[in-house]
Image: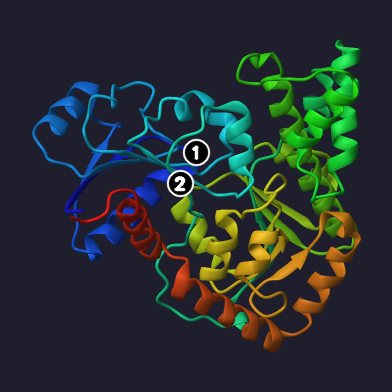
Amino acid sequence: MDKVLFIKGLSQYNLMRFWVDSLAIGFEKQNIEVDIIDFKYVDLLYLENLIAHNNYDAIIGFNGWLINQFNFKNIKCPYIFILIDHPIDHIDRINHLTDKDILTIIDRNDIYTIDKFCNMPKNVFLLPHAAQEVNYEQRFDEKMIDVLFSGSYLDPEEIRGKWLVHPILLSIFDEVVNRCLFEPQNYYISEFEKVMKEKGNFLDFKEDGSFVVLVQMIGRYIYSKRRELVLKEILDSGINVEIYGNGWENSSFVNYPNITLHQSVSYWALQDIMKKAKIILNIAGIANDGTHERVFAGMSNQSIVLTNETPYLKELFEDSVEVIFYNFSDISSVPAKINELLSSNEEMNKISYNAMRAIISQHTWNERAKEIIEIFYSVYPQE
C-alpha cells in the first residue's frame, strides 16, 4: 500500500471529520501517502477527476461516505468502509459494497445484523473506535467535574408513542423491550425474530423491509430508556452530573438541582472538557458485544470511565484496574460505585493512569491505521 484517498464529509459534532484527520496522520506515520477530499468544499466531479489522475491503493470512508452516490464499482482499488454506527442505519450503503471492497465493524454482533438485513460483504473485519494521540499526564486534584456525560436526549416514550395506533405492532415492541431492557445479553434484533416466530411470522428482512423501521425504533427506545434510567439513578442519589448534548432541556432532568446542562460542542472541544472530568459515564445502550468511542476518549484523557460492560470490553480491559464496569441488570449499584471512586483521589489516579497506558499501547487512531493496513494486506497480499 503506497497511496490512499480519504473521503471527508459532514457529521454530528464534526466527529468523523476529526477522525479522518487523525487516521490520515496514522497512515502517514506508516509512510503511506494520503489525499483527503472534503465534500464540505468540493463535489462528485472533482472526486471523479481526482481518482482518474491518481493510482490509489484504497479509498477510505467512514460510514461508507458516498458509496451509494458515486460509482465505485468501476474503480479498480477497494473501498474500505469503516462502519462506526449500527449497521441497520446504513443498509443501503452496505449493499453497495462489491467483492473487492472491505467493511469494518465495531460490534461483533454486527455480523448477525448484516446477515439479516444486508447482502453479506465478502471481506468483513472488526475495527473498534479509537482515541486521539495521548501525550500528557494529569492528576485528579486538577479535575473539576465529578461526573460527565455527553450525548443527545431522545424521549423514549415519544418513540414508543408512535406505535400506539398499531396495537399489534405495539405489543411486539413491548415484548421485545421487556426481554432486553434489563437483560443486556439479549440482543434486540434476535429477540424480535423470536417474538415474530412465536406469533407464527417468519421474516426475511432482505425481502420484506416493512419491519425495519419497527426494529430501528425498538433499538432507539432501548438505547434512550437505558440512558434515562442510569442517569436518574445517579441524580436521585444526589451526585453532581454535567451533561453536554442536545435536547436535555426537554427532559424531566431539568428539575434536578444537581445537574448542569450544556449545549452540544464539537468533538474536539469535548476532549478539553473530558480532561476536566473525574468520571466519564458511558451508556452504550445497544452495544451488545462491542464498545463506544467515549470509552477510549475518556481513558485517553485520564478520566475514570464508568461504562456498561460488554463481552468485548471485558476482554480489552480489567474491571477496577483500567475501567469501572456496571451492568444494566443492576443499575442501582451505579451511585455506590461513583461515590466510592470520588472518595479516593489516590485510587482514581491509579486507575486513570492504567487506563491511559492501555490506550497508548493499543487504541489510538495511529494503532487503527496499522490495523487497517494489516486488514488490507490480508485481503490483498503483497506480491
Residue bearing mark 2: 15
Instruction: Pinpoint residue 123: horizontal percent, then vertical percent.
Output: 42, 42
Residue at image position (67%, 48%) is 287
Label 2 secondary element: helix
Residue matched to label 1: 12
Residue positioned 60% across, 42% down in the render? 110
Query: How crowded is the residue under tag 1: few (<14 C-alpha within 10 Å), some, or many (20+)?
Result: few
Closest to the observer, 378 or 338:
378
Q: Which amino acid does the dot numbered 2 rest on?
A: Leu
Q: Nearer the viewer, residue 380 or 345?
A: 380
Numbered disc total? 2
Q: Position of residue 348 (x, y in %)?
A: 67, 81
> Is residue 250 in sight in this rendering?
no
Please determine whether, in this image, residue 328 is positioned above or below residue 76.
below
Residue 20's place in the image compared with 218, above or below, is: below
Image location of residue 269, percent across then percent down:
47, 55
Numbered mark located on residue 304 in the image: none
| Percent x, y of residue 260 | 71, 54
Amino acid type for the residue under numbered disc 1: Gln
Q: Is residue 1 above or below residue 280?
A: above
User: Residue pushed farthest front?
Assistant: 383
Tell me the quarter of the picture where residue 72 sits.
top left
Q: Are marks 2 and 1 in contact (CB under 8 Å)?
A: yes
Which quarter of the image is occupied by the C terminus?
A: bottom left
Helix, strand or loop at mark 1:
helix
